[in-house]
Amino acid sequence: MDNLIEELKGKLIDILSLTDVSPADMDADAQLVGGELGIDSIDVLEMVVMVEKDYGVVINSQEVGEKVFSSLRSLAAYIKENRQQDN
Amino acid sequence: MRLAVESCAIAPLSLFALVQNDPLPVGQVDGLDDVPDLPRTHRLALAAARQAMQGRKNPPDAVIVGTTTGGMLESEELLRAGVRDGTKYRYHGLGTVAETVGRKYHCSGPMLTVSTACSSGAVALALALRMLRMGKAERVLVGGVDSLCRLTYFGFHFLQLVDRNGCHPLDKNRQGMAVAEGAAMVLLTNRPPENPLAELVGAGLTCDAYHPAAPHPWGAGAMAAMRAALADAGISPADIDYINLHGTGTRENDLAEARAVRALFPDPPPLSSIKGATGHSLAAAGAIEAVVASLVVRKGLLPPNIGLERIDPALHLRALRKPEQKAARLVLSNSFGFGGNNGALVIGSPRPIPVNSTARHRPGKDLYIHGIAAASGAGMTAATMERLRSGNQVAGCVDADLAAAALGAKTIRRLKRLPRIALGLARSACDDADPAVAPASVFMGTGWGALTETNDFLDRLFATDERFPSPIDFVGSVHNSPAGQVAIMLGATGANITTSGGDYSFEQTLFAAGLMIREDETALVLGVDEYHQHLSPLFDPSVGGDAVPADGGGGFVVSRSRSGGSCRVRLLYYGAGVAGTGPLIVAYGGSVGLQNGIGLVLAGIPAADQRQGEEQLRQFLAQVDFSAPVIRYRQLIGEFASASAVAAVLAATLVDRGNAGTLGAMGQPIDPHRGGVLVLGLGSTITAMEFGRP
């Protein structure tokens, strides 16, 4: 789980161009969207595409999305859970 | 128009094949004429223009087209197939749509292209209205057009803005829009024709300056646009008999628009969105709905909100569920787009309407420059101007990090090359001006738009078999994305207009600024293009060959206030190349005036138009009997569409310094007694920007 969180940090920095942020700055439990990182609705959609592309996990409703993207930890948990179901 | 029969034209996409997945519902035009080599967008525009011009003998004085796709549908296929022959992309540019329509109807005047996403059609009509009121034209053929293409089909889908079950505006269970295509053109005249259909009474343009894609949650900019349109028409909310909503069917748009309507109309008149029937035809929508509004006032028939089953109680609106026969004298039509771009039109029956004529502004013809900025291969403003003034080349690619150096990391996080340069120029021009005068409106010309975002979106779309394109790249690929970002950075909530007409895009934006800027308003005028190593040589026929890769741009903070201005600027002339330079000389007031007033000519001859441009220049110099020096500025600034914006900043700098500088390497001293500088654009279009002492 912690490994996945660290992996996600790197991916988010890359796809969302968070060039002024280092993985150590990112709190796994902090509010992900609308928080200090400045992540907004377009970034969420970019993350949706990444999660499906890299982990094969589909997030296709706003209700699910709001829960999943509430923090890095919840995102990692959702990926872990739904990946396992696939396997 | 089949709105009275409550039909819906939305059906699964069949225009192009998908690599996978079932086609989503779209609004697709059937039975379009096949014209070899001409892209679908152009053919849609011609089909609409043919109807508008039916029975009209005289050519229009101007053509204005709103479009976002241009030749994109065909370019996508060529790019996917790896076609590297630039001639195949000759209709890619947005400006080629207006030029194709203009040529067909023998227009020798301005052929302008507006690209403000989904408000483009409405913004085009607003510009046409201003042209007619200011006496710049008597007959304008104007409208909007977009064809379906992969960029918009997948772009909106991956933004999760497309409803898989058709389109249900205002419905409790609405899930989004249906991407569509279409065209509408109207012939607007300054005097009522024999049997007028309707009158365009007023227009209001604003910008949310809030978010690149999402509307302001309370519809602040939407309400301001409606309010401005009513004020422009000299009427009050109570005068409106019907509102044609933007009503795309997305959760956010419909909620924000409903809030805006309720804020302005305590007791809203009958209203509906037609997009449940037509889908959302993007740049065409505003023009199509202006035609619908015209039919409403003409026929007294209010169209129903197709697709509505259960209205969303959160909207607190009542919408028309059935067509209603009811006289409507004045109709409000809304169009909103990415970049927080808002346009509202008031269309009325052509009977005499009590209009408060003082509400209609008649601004002076000149603009005054209060701040300047430029970016080139040589650096930003000071470095660029220093080299140019001594006659040295600045051609090369802008250091985008340098251009964006003064901007915060969060501001530029999602921005690639073009918006970084644009925002850097905007910041720099504002820093050069009096900080007390913050620009309210933004005008930006770009020949090719954000090429990096466009390229990256399509590359990933193709590479992943249409599965994983980047939503961020889609939002960034829209031509007016940089101007929308500038508005957010500056808090500029006035009109926000992006024009795109190849090598004359900056001139078009100066044209639009001259029409739109109010007496009391400060505006930012920009011209910017980026060099993209893959796409620029394909799209821009002047790029490649001997020319070094080059990009950049320039910009001004302008207002109608002479006080504090360093230079006066006006777009003196804009017309078709085939008309020659004669009309330009007439526009200045004759050759004697030119001989006495102009101390320097900066001539822009695109490499692709070398022969035609040189011939035009030779004719011009012969007609005027000109002795002032002429500098072919593209040799110094480089071959790119917005090179004229850098030339414009050079002209303003030279005028400000009393032409004291010499372009030494060219060996051409400038006569200090003739203070004006003329920046000519030559080739397929002829333009003249005049710079003089304030």
Image (spheres, coloured by chain):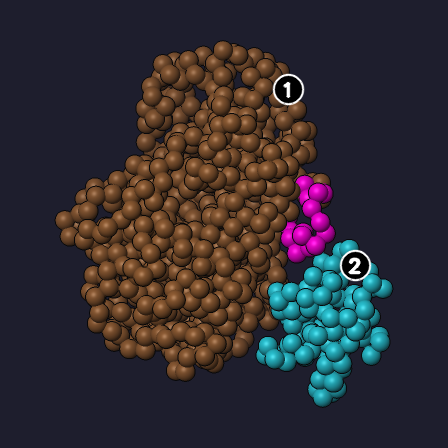
Chain colours: A cyan, B brown
User: SS for tag 1?
Assistant: loop
Where residue B357 appears, as percent x and y from the top left, is 29, 43
Quadrant containing the N terminus of chain B is bottom left
Q: Nearer the viewer, residue B448 or B478?
A: B478
Reading the image, the residue beneath label 1 is: B390
The quadrant where residue B459 appears: bottom right
Q: Is residue A24 above or below residue A64?
A: above
Q: Is residue B13 above or below residue B595?
A: below
Q: Nearer the viewer, residue B555 or B434?
A: B434
**B96 sits to left or right of B534:** left
User: SS for tag 2?
Assistant: loop
**Cα separation between marks 1 and 2:** 43 Å
Where residue A61 appears, as percent x and y from the top left, is 59, 79
Q: Amino acid at mark 1?
A: Ser
Residue B649 visible somewhere in the drawing: yes
The quadrant where residue B513 appears: top left
Q: Is residue B318 above or below residue B55?
A: below
Q: Residues within 10 Å of mark 1 (few under 14, many from 20)?
A: some
Where residue A33 appears, as percent x and y from the top left, is 69, 68
Q: Nearer the viewer, residue A7 or B337?
A: B337
